[in-house]
Image (tube, coloured by chain):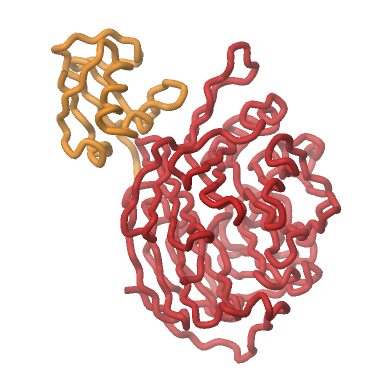
Chain colours: A red, B orange
Amino acid sequence: MAKTSRKPGPRKKAAQPKSKKKAAGVAGRGVVVLVATRKGAWIYRGDPARRTWRASGPHFLGHIVHHMVLDPRDGRTLLAAAKTGHLGPTVFRSTDFGKTWKEAVKPPAFARPVEGSSVPARSVDHTFWLTPAHGREPNVWYAGTSPQGLFRSGDGGVTWEPFSIINDDPKYREWMGAQQDGTPDGPKMHSIIVDPRDPKHLYFAMSSGGVHETADGGKSFTPLVGGMEVVEGLDASVMTYHDPHCVVMCPSNPDRLYQQNHCGIYRLDRPSTTWVRIGKAMPPKVGDVGFSMVVHPYDASTAWVLPMDGSTVWPRTSPAGKPAVYMTRNAGNTWKRLDHGLPAKDAWWTVKRQAMTADGRDPVGLYFGTTSGELWMSRDEGARWSCLARHLPEIYAVETALLR
Amino acid sequence: MKVLIPSPLLSYTKTNRVEAAGDTMAELLSDLDRQYPGLRFRVIDEQDRMRPHMRFFVNGKQVHDLSLQLRPDDAIHIVQALSGG
């Protein structure tokens, strides 16, 4: 059993959600935290106070688990994207909240190239991202892979098929680049977002390759990179140079997106197609480079980031070894440092793009997992932090859900 | 023919020595997948390429071609390559 330690913190109470109506009904519900790591997955179940946690795991010990997600439509189906150092990629599925798992009958896999195709054949190295589809589409899921590919399951994750035109479209393949254009762990398809108002309206992002959207259920996609910067000296009109690290949609306002990019923090208010770099308001010594981006479930003006050192050779550690979360309450006009309870110095970890998230409670709980295997949480929207678990393998992803 | 199974695949076969049939390596792997659904994709990718860290030996000799002809008395070893932490 994992138990959080209580640490002294500031007396200031966290700001209340602006949409109390939306927050109604979440009081008293326990939280589950899903942790995917380089060596397996863990599930932490918290009591309603979020003070006592019961851990289950490791699930799939030794498997590289990039993402584990609970289906919010039924509250009990879990999907986990896994591979091992030797074995190819697969997806595991549980319909009893992780008590038992079954492997997908047909995991995400690229199609064979048609005769005369100008694009070379590809193989999925790993499934990186899992997104449940719209609430009106039960059992539909989307998956993003490395190298970049978009897949869909219509049966709850049992079988997967390539989705939309992009996997083999010559222009998109050019934008995806080659292995050396991606992250050290391979180029990624990530941040697959479904508009809660319209199941045919989707966004996705590629590292590298930019942000894209479809309004017709994947029949066509349009780049959405206006205003996004690229590394100095490169041409921002070249899609391959765009490296969005994490894109999120505000649940309380689906017309507002936030993005943590290789080159800064951005906000986009639709129908505009031009991202605004809100990270310029961050302290210059800290900068606005990072992987993860989290939005408040009830307040579209509130978001959190966890900056990293993106200088010189890109250490990708906490700046100066002093980790901190930064929060904006005004859509990025100003940022506030939140580090109470976090190591004051000599902490050289970082937090990957899927490894920071929020629960739906009021006040909102925040959670992040580090590359050094620590799971941190805040019950008060980032004002105070405590360590929920240590000594886990490198954490790749952290997701939460409210227990029913 | 006899097939030696590496430990990462024991979740499929439950034993490290199994029997499978086929006139070629491709057929042998299809037969293994018929008996142990899902096994093939973990070692052969969707373009019919052997995965990078899996090795296949026939009578002690490493093979790279799935169209390789097999005989009923061949001994097949599927081996996980060495890897770091």
Q: Quadrant of the N terminus of chain A?
A: bottom left
Residue drawn where x is 36% and y is 43% of the image: A103
Q: Residue furthest bottom?
A: A11
The picture places residue A350, in percent across and down from the top left corner, at 54, 59
Q: Quadrant of residue B33?
A: top left
Residue at the location (58% across, 79% down)? A25
> Measured from the top left, where is residue A219 in percent x and y?
70, 35
Residue A67 can be seen, yes or no: yes
What residue is drawn where x is 49% and y is 60%?
Answer: A74
Q: Is residue A142 above or below residue A375?
A: above
Residue A375 vs residue A339, the one in the foreground: A375
- Residue found 56% across the figure and 38% down from its top: A151
Q: Nearer the viewer, residue A386 or B74?
A: B74
Which of the 4 image quadrants contains residue A54?
A: bottom left
Side of A6 where A254 appears, left or right: right
Horizontal side of A365 relative to B8 (left or right) equals: right
Residue B78 percent location from the top left of the image:
25, 26
For residue A375, above or below residue A195: below
Along the horizontal axis of the image, is A284 left or right of A358? right
Residue A350 seen in render:
no
**Residue A264 point in image, percent of width and height:** 73, 55
Q: Nearer the viewer, residue A126 or A106?
A: A106
Disc tally is 0
